[in-house]
Image (cartoon, rainbow, N blue to C red):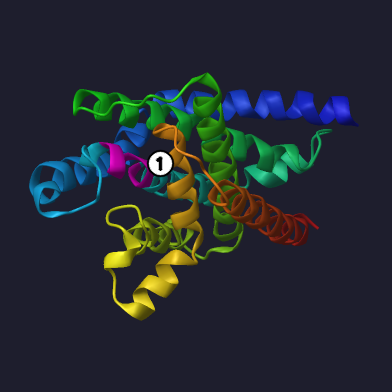
Amino acid sequence: MTKDFFGDTAVLLGRSLRHITRSLDTIITTTIMPIAFMLLFVYVFGGAINSGSHSYVNYLLPGILLITIASGISYTGFRLFLDMKSGIFERFQSMPIARSSVLWAHVLTSLVANLISLVVVVLVALLMGFRSSAGVLAWLAIAGILILFILALTWIAVIPGLSAKSADGASAFAYPLIFLPFISSAFVPTKTMPGPVRAFAEHQPVTSIVNAIRDLFTQQPVGADIWIALAWCVGILIVAYIFAMVIYRRKIS
């Protein structure tokens, strides 16, 4: 069964990736908005923002990476919705394949597409002056956090992808996720915010994830932030996975 699952997932992953390569505009579109935000905040607002950092692009990049992921996973829900409506899931269920491999193929496609987008954003940030003294282990830790975040948000995307009534509804859930970094430490220190906003910003997942990545980039002690960030990512991933699988089983039963 395990061998069948991995084999079936690999085949379906290849199918999904071929769709991505035929529509590279999807990846380009998901990177344009984060890059536009980065250009806007660094070159227009950056001079007026006191981030406590010598380079605002260094301060800003972790939040931009999370916005990149949030904008990218909306396409997962959209592609999944189209597959559901086209009847392809029913055709797959009539074939001798592992049932969950269909969902995992979409999830892994999201992971690959988002990692490509993140690399593009980092390259643009380097052109804008981003520099990091992080070593190999720190970069691996950053990659691990981002991968967990991608998987967590992707499984959230699976839920509307399976249950939405329209294509717009399948992708619209991502808008609040894109907005969430703006009420966090991604763009400005939370200490500059008024009381209630500051309380929310300091206790939502984006702030701990941003702080952990920022500390890793600058080789600062990460403290509790990295464990809080991992707890948020793993917790969201587990809950979203359970809900997605329950909905999926109801759909195909």
Residue occupying image coordinates x 84% and y 33%: 96
Image quarter of the C terminus: bottom right
Residue 86 in view here:
no
Residue occupying image coordinates x 58% and y 51%: 224
Residue 165 in view here:
yes
In the picture shown, does residue 126 fall above or below 103?
Answer: above
Circle 1: element type: helix
Instruction: Read off the residue under disc 1.
Output: 214
Residue occupying image coordinates x 34% and y 63%: 190
Main secondary structure found in the magenta portion: helix
Residue occupying image coordinates x 55% and y 39%: 145
What are the residue bounds of the magenta stretch? 58-64
Q: Position of residue 209 (x, y in %)?
A: 49, 49
Q: Does 153 appear in magenta?
A: no
Q: Position of residue 246 (x, y in %)?
A: 76, 60
Q: Callout 1, which amino acid?
A: Arg
Q: Position of residue 48 (x, y in %)?
A: 10, 54
Q: Residue furthest bottom?
A: 196
In the picture shown, does residue 175 fall above or below 51?
Answer: below
Q: Residue furthest right?
A: 1
Where, by quadrant of the figure, is residue 178 drawn? bottom left
